Image (tube, helix red, strand yellow):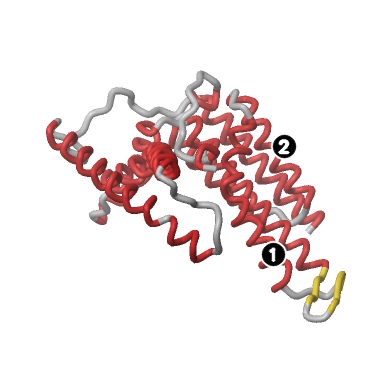
Amino acid sequence: MLNDITLGQYFPGTSPIHRMDPRMKLILTIIYIVGVFLVKSFAGYAVAFLFLYLIVRIAEIPFKYLIKGVKPLRFIIIFTFLLNLFFLTGETPLLDIGPVHLTREALFNAVYFSLRLVFLVMGTSVLTLTTSPVQLTDALERLLHPLQRFHFPAHELAMMMTIALRFIPTLLDETDKIQKAQMARGADFESGNLIQRAKAMIPLLVPLFVSSFRRANDLAMAMEARCYRGGDHRTRLRELRYTRLDAVAAVVMCGFIVVIILEGRIFG
């Protein structure tokens, strides 16, 4: 399961999506997620899926990467589905057996909420797979720069978010190594009830926390040894500039939002 998490990983390439300005990619990703939350029918989700599939094809990313990113969240998706299925009310009953009351509206809402989570993860994965951590840091800092007038630490926040995102694959790899080492010593992480499994995770979490703090300390010492200072006085190897490609992408995303809005009025 740990190897299936793609969030934070970068897939190098030279596709038009890779060449876009990271600021535009970040903004369009947020707009896409908002558009998904505006969908009110299965036709709208079909449009959102086709749009995402087209983007993945243009980015030359294997679609299986996005599927792998959803797999670790399957329990959260199933829990969300069941929660909306049995705890929401409606007017069209489908099943009424004892304490179980299932309605058509609850079923549709459960499917909609589950699909929103799937598209949320997939859309975010496309952003991280096509944007390097350095580019993502620059994009976040530039977008948050106007807030510095109010003494908002834009650079520091962007750096912390990007470092956290960058170290997700590293921590997952470290977790996998610790888990295999503990299993070689006789640890059992799969059998027993919920409480026993939780207790079995202690030999895994303690070394992971120790390793995480050690990595953080080494990174801080390395940055200080190189006289790292954030803020307005830093220069960049590559300056961010919007191009015609970004304008075309913005127009295409506006068309997607218009289609979603029209779909909501027709099928909603």
Q: Is residue 163 above or below residue 194?
A: above
Please name the residue shown 65% across and 37% down the image.
52
Q: Is residue 103 above or below residue 42?
A: below
Left or right: 214 as drawn, with respect to 37:
left
Within 10 angstroms of label 2, few (less than 14), some, or many (20 or more) residues?
A: few
Left or right: 43 as drawn, with respect to 54:
right
Amino acid type at image mark 2? Leu
In the rendered image, the quadrant that contains the N terminus is: top right
Residue 172 in view (yes/no): no
In the rendered image, the quadrant that contains the C terminus is: bottom right
Within 10 angstroms of label 1, few (less than 14), some, or many (20 or more) residues?
A: some
Residue 137, image x and y in percent? 35, 37
Residue extending farthest to the front is 186
Amino acid type at image mark 1? Leu
Camera-side residue of 172 and 115? 172
Residue 214, image x and y in percent? 23, 43
State the separation of the CA atoms marked 2 and 1: 26 Å
Numbered badge on residue 185: none
Camera-side residue of 108 and 247? 108
Q: Quadrant of residue 172?
A: top left
Residue 21, image x and y in percent? 45, 30
Q: Is residue 181 above or below residue 106?
A: above
Camera-side residue of 255 and 163? 163
Residue 53, image x and y in percent? 68, 33
Secondary structure at numbered mark 2: helix
Identify the residue position indicated by label 2 in the image.
Answer: 50
Q: State yes or no: discs 2 and 1 in contact (Cβ < 8 Å).
A: no
Secondary structure at numbered mark 1: helix
Viewer-nearest of labels 2 and 1? Answer: 1
Left or right: 74 as drawn, with respect to 88:
left
Identify the residue position indicated by label 1 in the image.
Answer: 82
